[in-house]
Amino acid sequence: MKQYAFLAITAALGVGSWIQGAEAQQRPPGGEVEIVPVRQNFYMLAGAGANIGVLVGPDGFIVVDTGAATMTDKVLQALDTLADGTR
């Protein structure tokens, strides 16, 4: 039984390390928010503490997962960029 517990803990630590490494690769350098077009009128904001989904419509935005509070200003700047239609 102890052997299975050890294997489970080792696997959990390995998965946790892999996820942390994958998150670090997704973050744009310098703590910036990157606007990634996914489909027409749908974008992903990467690097805001989470990947944020943004649907742009005629009446405004639908934002899914607002990211980290420390990145609020940069997320709002990215939304302003989308609102200006420069993407």
Image (cartoon, rainbow, N blue to C red):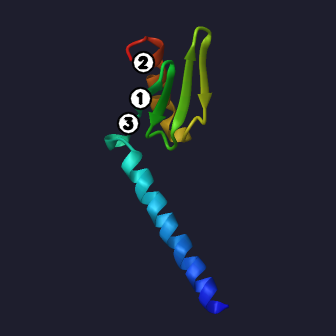
Q: Tell me whether the residue at label 3 lies in contact with that at label 1, contact meaning CB atoms closer than 8 angstroms.
A: no
Please report contact status of discs 1 and 2: CB closer than 8 Å, yes or no: yes
Mark 3 or 1: the one toward you: 1
Q: For the residues marked 3 and 2, what is the alpha-carbon distance in whole angstroms?
A: 13 Å
Reading the image, the residue beneath label 2 is 81
Residue 35: give its label: 1
Q: Secondary structure at mark 2?
A: helix
Farthest residue to the left: give it.
Answer: 29
**Which of the two discs, 1 and 2, sits closer to the camera?**
1
Amino acid type assigned to the residue bearing label 1 in the image: Ile
Q: At which x and y percent is residue 14? A: 48, 70
**Residue extending furthest toward the front:** 39
Rendered position, 1 above or below 36:
below
How packed is label 3: few (under 14 Cα within 10 Å), some, or many (20 or more)? some
* Sequence-first disc among 3 and 2: 3
Residue furthest to the bottom = 2
- Name which residue lies at 54% across and 41% down: 68
Q: Is residue 58 left or right of residue 81?
A: right
Q: Residue 26 appears at what percent x and percent y?
A: 40, 46
The residue nearer to you, when weighing 3 against 44, is 3
Question: What element does badge 3 sit on?
Answer: loop
Give the SS element for disc 1: strand
Q: Can you tell which quarter of the image residue 65 is in?
A: top right
Mark number displayed over residue 15: none
82 vs 29: above or below = above
Above or below — where is 76 with respect to 57? below
Residue drawn at 44 percent across, 37 percent down = 46
Image quadrant holding the C terminus, namely: top left
Q: Amino acid at mark 3?
A: Glu
Q: Which mark is residue 32?
A: 3
Q: Position of residue 76 (x, y in %)?
A: 50, 25
Where is residue 3? Give x, y as percent. Answer: 60, 90
